[in-house]
Image (cartoon, rainbow, N blue to C red):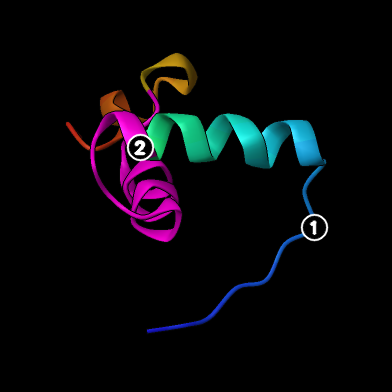
Amino acid sequence: MVIVSVRLPKATVDSLNQQARRYHISRSEYMRRRLARPDSRTGSSSHARG
């Protein structure tokens, strides 16, 4: 596992906190889930089909 540090605007962090509270998880866990989720907008899932 790798640790990553990022600087975010306060408004972004406030939004992340709000979303994490909605799912009853920590902000860190919410960010991990968002980063691990495939992004359908880039079409990256079509590359895996071969």
Name the image quarter holding the N terminus.
Answer: bottom left
In the rendered view, tell whether residue 10 sits above or below residue 7.
above
Q: Is residue 48 magenta?
A: no
Instruction: Identify the residue at image location x=24%, y=34%.
Output: 23
The residue at which mark 1 appears reads as: 7
Amino acid carrying mark 1 in the image: Arg
In the rendered view, tell whether residue 48 sits above or below residue 26.
above
Q: Residue furthest top?
A: 41
The residue at which mark 2 appears reads as: 21
Q: Residues within 10 Å of mark 1 (few under 14, many from 20)?
A: few
Name the image quarter holding the C terminus.
Answer: top left
Instruction: Identify the residue at image location x=67%, y=71%.
Output: 5
Instruction: Identify the residue at image location x=43%, y=59%.
Output: 28
Q: Position of residue 4 (x, y in %)?
A: 60, 73
Corner quadrant of residue 19: top left
Q: CA distance from mark 1 to mark 2?
A: 21 Å
Q: Residues within 10 Å of mark 2 (few under 14, many from 20)?
A: few
Instruction: Identify the residue at image location x=36%, y=19%.
Output: 40
Q: Residue furthest left?
A: 49
User: Which element carries disc 1, helix, strand or loop?
Assistant: loop
Q: Which circle's residue, 1 or 2, is located before the other in the chain?
A: 1
Relative side of 37 to 41, left or right: left
Viewer-closest of 7 and 36 = 7
Q: Is residue 27 magenta?
A: yes
Amino acid carrying mark 2 in the image: Arg
Give the magenta-colored segment's residue range. 21-39
User: Which element carries disc 2, helix, strand or loop?
Assistant: helix
Q: Position of residue 30 (x, y in %)?
A: 37, 47
Mark 1 vs mark 2: in front: 2
